[in-house]
Image (cartoon, grey):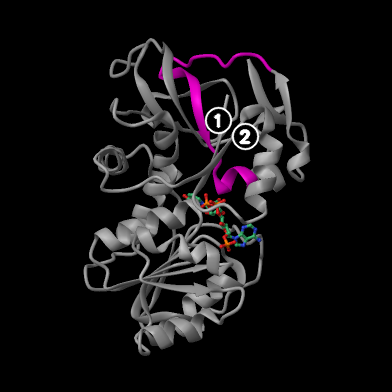
Amino acid sequence: MKAAVYYENGPPEVLRYEDVPDPQCHPKGVVIRVAAIAIEGGDTLNRFGGPLMTNPHVVGYQAAGEVIEVGSEVSHLKVGDRVCTTSGWGSHAELRAVSARTAWKIPDSLSFQEASVIPVTFGTADDCLFEFGRLKAGEIALIQAGASGVGVAAIQLAARAGAKMVIATASSDERLEKLKPLGMTHGINYATHDVVEEVMRITEKHGADVVVDSVGGAVLQGSILSLAYRGRVSTVGQAGRDRQKMDLSTLMGGNRTISGVFLGAEINTDRVQKNMASLIDRVAKGELKVVIDRTFPLSEAAAAHSYIESRQAVGRVLLIP
Ligand SMILES: NC(=O)c1ccc[n+]([C@@H]2O[C@H](COP(=O)([O-])OP(=O)(O)OC[C@H]3O[C@@H](n4cnc5c(N)ncnc54)[C@H](OP(=O)(O)O)[C@@H]3O)[C@@H](O)[C@H]2O)c1
């Protein structure tokens, strides 16, 4: 099969389009013919500096497609099923092998492109807001990097859950403008404005009850300082690639909490499995929207990664084999 691979970490140019052996089907897994690949923030981070589990390495968490082979111990999926999948690597390819637990059937009404985006973005945003952030109707949510894949999902989920305000940050006014139809009530351009000051001004000094932070570093410090009394931060990523250490001293006085969130650690639990089926259903019904910025052919994976790193994309960039 053809795949986008790399032999070493580095800039997007390390990606090459090559022939690699077809993946093997595990007894508890399936193999799919990939129809759409959603490039995750974790994929660009892995290419930049993450571990190469295979060499050459086929990066990538998310892809949707049709099941072409089923493992001997799998009973709930069959050849021909349409599924979206997630796994630690292997999405940037014409074929992918995954555990059957992380291959979810999708309804005919959902396109492969939409479905490819759902599990990691909506699943992660949901855990950040509700499982770990404990967001309730009437509270205030702050979504850092609101134009990111996780961000556009979090804005919608917070708005649908009845948040009183959904504040989002982004690196340009143009990006913020595109978040309004999703449910953002207030935007902060964090390239030109101080987030903590703006949050306190917008909320009349209440602060944010729940913050979803996928950027880390200096941005995470701002998230902590933006919290309301008993506020909760879900720290879920390092998109800023900034290893600044945190000052946690303001947490204690305000009975505030910071939780690390990693969807992968609980993806096999019944809780997340049930939640994933519900999120797929809500997208299929049109209650939640998948935001696709643009698509590239799989052979142009390097250009797609470059485009994402130019910080112009709102929502997801896809690869099509
Ligand atoms: N723990 C988990 O379970 C989990 C699950 C999903 C994702 N993640 C992590 O969450 C992070 C975001 O993932 P994603 O898929 O939402 O990412 P994404 O769609 O690629 O978006 C990343 C966003 O980060 C912002 N950003 C801030 N500083 C940046 C920098 N120096 N370079 C590039 N972008 C920068 C950009 O928005 P602005 O230009 O507007 O700032 C960009 O839109 C990643 O670190 C990923 O690994 C973790």
Q: Label 1 crowding class (10 Å Cα cut-off): few <14, some 14-19, many 20+? A: many
Name which residue type carries label 1.
Answer: Ser
Q: Position of residue 110 (x, y in %)?
A: 33, 32
Q: Is residue 43 magenta?
A: yes
Please say if the residues under marks 1 and 2 sit with CB atoms less than 8 Å apart: yes
The residue indicated by pointer 1 is 91
At 28% across and 66% down in the image, what residue appears? 135
Name which residue type carries label 2.
Answer: Val
Q: Which residue is more in the foreground, 241 or 18?
A: 18
Q: Is mark 1 within 8 Å of ligand 1?
A: no
Q: Which residues are magenta?
A: 20-44
The residue indicated by pointer 2 is 59
Q: Where 213 falls versus 122 (above or below)?
A: below
Q: Is residue 176 magenta?
A: no
- Which mark is on residue 158? none
Q: Where 218 falls versus 318 (above or below)?
A: below
Let me know if residue 107 appears in the view. yes
Q: Mark 1 falls on what kind of element? A: loop
Q: Which residue is more in the foreground, 238 or 164?
A: 164
Q: Position of residue 273 (x, y in %)?
A: 30, 38
